Image (cartoon, rainbow, N blue to C red):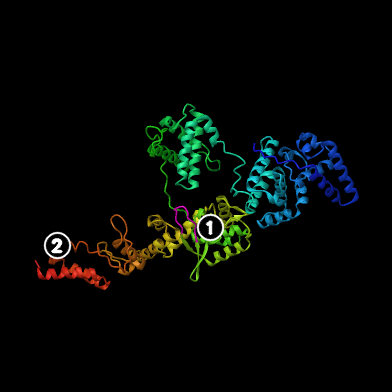
């Protein structure tokens, strides 16, 4: 357990000075008499604060109420570091004693916690715990440093857990401490708070490095060295995933193959056993079996681990990589799921009626910008930028290590302005989305979307579906793939082309427009031998554009992104070649090509065809 360095016990003179003030603070003569008796009883039983603080806890708890009250008041007023076990187990009202000693600090804390959105009942519990932490540290709440707060809080938490037999009382302890961490961070007296209560428990399948080092020190050393190197070039979130996989694999080896004490001892048998064990673990929300993406991720992490330690010439490395590429399951690649127009309209109508302003902001930003969930969580308070007369939203560096500007819908701009207007200006974090002073987790975004979908009468809707919906709506209404790629932050058009496959409205409209004309021809009475010829306008302008794009812009191994109005020096590359040969029989075709180039203003292309025509005139054979 953590310990707190004990300060010097207050002297007799300091205690005597406090006694006079303590007795005079009684509201009535009866109260002052009771306090005087408490002082007398305290001196008779303990002598001074040093004797009281070092007396057995049972002896301190058995004294009369007025004696215990004086001792607690004196400890708070003199800044005495009280034994953590006594602070946790005693019935002293530490929150009341600290409030009476520091009324201004209490008022400021109440005001700041309320600014962050906590209710009065929650703030009262947080103040009680903060008072106990301050008493353990031997100082006032306002004088706590981040180091003192962390040490005293850990000590208080551990003693409380021990008092309850190792079980954490969630409602009375974890919830107030969870909120207190956020308030103290913004006050500059605590480190940045975690998004979740990770200090409450550890998953049984993920043992810590302390146990791994005790059982397999060589393997632990190799894995930790590998993770340290990964931390220099990868994101913390990626390193955290690698860390989980390696701890999980090491825990499996400790349990099922205790003889494997180094990475060099791992062979194919151990990988196959781990893969089978992993596949049998419960999956998402208790479903039987892990999903293919999760299983593939774990095996991919292990393959990277063994490949790299071999390439990096680690002493503790196997002769060959025991994890094969085929160990990763082949994943399905279904089309992105999106909301059709009717569903999207119902969803957005439900979003406008959400009672929680944070839910409204989350859903509207996702739906109207097509941002990824991680990008939304990383938005800062200065993300809105005015360029010219319009407003743009600057996304943080996200999944593809790039940032971008997104045109901001006026309604979303109003929501962000309103959110910032109600934000406490003294907070230390510059993140836009904070819930009671704490960065919101990804699950908070999921819940907002699920809540909106339920209100709209839809089924399960994931935040990323809103991104797919925006892209599908855009391509169905004529937005170019280049513009969609810029909006979504894609590296290349290959990522955006998937939305061309699901842009079904444009295809369907053109299909039914053409099939109506075709059906009318089928209905006409004609001899079976007579060929059916459709007029040129039957294709429609959109389908003619598709045909032109497919025939001119589609290459053998990709696509040409050149705008149609621009010339291309390679368009007549064959005709410009010295090995090119033509005869008079091709003159009509060359003449038509020359006329087409002239009509389009492609002078370079026209000159090539002019030269070919002149060559035919000079040498018709």
Specify few, some or many for label 2: CA neighbours under 10 Å numbering under 14, 14-19, or 20 or more. Answer: few
Mark with earlier residue (1, 2):
1
Q: Is residue 26 above or below residue 45?
A: below
Is residue 577 visible from the viewing direction of this image? Answer: yes
Query: Position of 393 compared to 130: left or right?
Result: left
State the image coordinates of residue 44 (x, y, percent, origin top left): 85, 37
Give the distance between the C-alpha atoms of the residues marked 1 and 2, in whole angstroms.
62 Å
Where disc 1 sits, the SS reads loop
Q: Which mark is residue 314?
A: none
Split into 4 quadrants, where in the image is the N terminus? top right
Which residue in the structure is indicated by mark 1?
379
Relative height, residue 240 to residue 584 (above, below): above
User: Which is more toward the observer, 158 or 256?
Assistant: 158
Does 207 appear in magenta?
Answer: no
**Percent x, y for residue 83?**
72, 38
The quadrant in which the C terminus is found is: bottom left
Q: Are marks 1 and 2 in contact (CB under 8 Å)?
A: no
> What x and y, as percent, mark residue 433?
58, 56
Q: Residue at x 28, y 55 (%)?
A: 556
Rendered residue at 26%/73% (across/down): 599
Q: Would you say 534 lies left or right of 20 here?
A: left
98 lies above or below 592: above
| Residue 453 pos. (x, y %) | 56, 55
Q: Is residue 523 visible?
A: no
Tag 2's secondary structure? loop
Q: Quadrant of residue 69?
A: top right
Residue under label 2, please give it: 581
Can residue 402 be found in the magenta stretch?
A: yes
Circle 1 packing at 10 Å, graded few (<14), some (14-19), many (20+), is some
Image: magenta residue range:
394-403
Magenta span main SS: loop
């Amino acid at each position: 357990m953590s310990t707190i360095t004990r300060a010097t016990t207050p002297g007799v003179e300091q205690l005597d000075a406090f006694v006079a003030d303590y007795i005079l603070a009684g509201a009535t003569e009866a109260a002052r008499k009771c306090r005087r008796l408490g002082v007398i009883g305290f001196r008779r039983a303990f002598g001074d604060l040093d004797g009281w603080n070092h007396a057995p806890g049972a002896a301190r708890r058995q004294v009369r109420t007025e004696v215990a009250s004086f001792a607690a008041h004196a400890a708070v007023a003199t800044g005495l570091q009280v034994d953590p076990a006594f602070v946790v187990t005693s019935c002293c009202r530490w929150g009341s004693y600290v409030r009476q000693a520091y009324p201004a600090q209490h008022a400021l804390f109440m005001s700041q916690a309320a600014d962050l959105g906590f209710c009065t009942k929650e703030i009262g519990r947080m103040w009680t715990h903060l008072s106990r932490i301050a008493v353990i540290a031997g100082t006032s709440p306002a004088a706590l440093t981040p180091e003192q707060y962390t040490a005293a809080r850990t000590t208080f938490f551990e003693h409380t857990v021990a008092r309850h037999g190792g079980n954490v009382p969630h409602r009375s302890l974890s919830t107030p401490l969870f909120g207190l961490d956020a308030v103290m961070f913004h006050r500059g007296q605590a480190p940045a708070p975690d998004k979740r209560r990770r200090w409450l428990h550890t998953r049984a399948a993920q043992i810590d490095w302390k146990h791994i080092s005790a059982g397999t020190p060589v393997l632990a050393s190799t894995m930790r060295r590998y993770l340290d190197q990964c931390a220099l070039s990868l994101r913390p979130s990626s390193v955290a995933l690698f860390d989980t996989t390696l701890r999980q694999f090491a825990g499996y080896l400790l349990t099922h193959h205790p003889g494997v004490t180094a990475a060099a001892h791992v062979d194919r048998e151990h990988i196959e056993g781990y893969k089978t064990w992993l596949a049998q673990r419960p999956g998402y929300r208790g479903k039987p079996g892990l999903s293919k993406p999760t299983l593939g991720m774990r095996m991919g992490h292990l393959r990277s681990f063994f490949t790299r330690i071999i390439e990096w010439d680690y002493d503790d490395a196997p002769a060959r990589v025991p994890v094969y590429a085929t160990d990763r399951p082949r994943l399905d690649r279904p089309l992105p799921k999106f909301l059709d127009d009717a569903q999207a309209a119902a969803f957005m109508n439900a979003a406008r009626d959400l009672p929680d302003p944070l839910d409204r902001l989350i859903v509207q930003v996702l739906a109207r910008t097509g941002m990824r969930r991680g990008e939304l969580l990383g938005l800062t308070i200065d993300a809105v930028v005015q360029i010219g007369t319009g407003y743009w939203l600057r996304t943080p560096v996200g999944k593809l290590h790039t940032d971008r500007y997104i045109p901001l819908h006026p309604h979303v701009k109003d929501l962000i302005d309103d959110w910032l207007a109600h934000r406490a200006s003294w907070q230390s974090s510059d993140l836009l989305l904070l819930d009671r002073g704490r960065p919101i987790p990804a699950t908070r975004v999921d819940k907002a979307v699920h809540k909106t979908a339920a209100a709209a009468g839809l089924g399960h809707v994931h935040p990323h579906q809103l991104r797919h919906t925006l892209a599908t709506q855009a391509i169905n209404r004529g937005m170019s793939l280049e513009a969609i790629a810029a909006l979504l932050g894609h590296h290349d058009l290959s990522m955006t082309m998937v939305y061309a496959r699901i842009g079904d409205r444009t295809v369907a409209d053109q299909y039914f427009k053409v099939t109506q004309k075709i059906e009318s021809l089928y209905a006409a009475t004609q001899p079976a031998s007579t060929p059916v010829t459709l007029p040129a306008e039957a294709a429609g302008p959109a389908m003619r554009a598709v045909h032109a794009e497919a025939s001119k812009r589609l290459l053998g191994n990709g696509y040409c992104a050149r705008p149609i109005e621009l010339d291309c020096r390679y368009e007549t590359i064959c005709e410009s070649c010295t090995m090119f040969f033509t005869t008079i029989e091709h003159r009509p075709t060359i003449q038509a090509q020359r006329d087409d180039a002239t009509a389009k203003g492609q002078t370079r292309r026209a000159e090539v065809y002019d030269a070919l025509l002149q060559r035919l005139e000079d040498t018709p054979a």
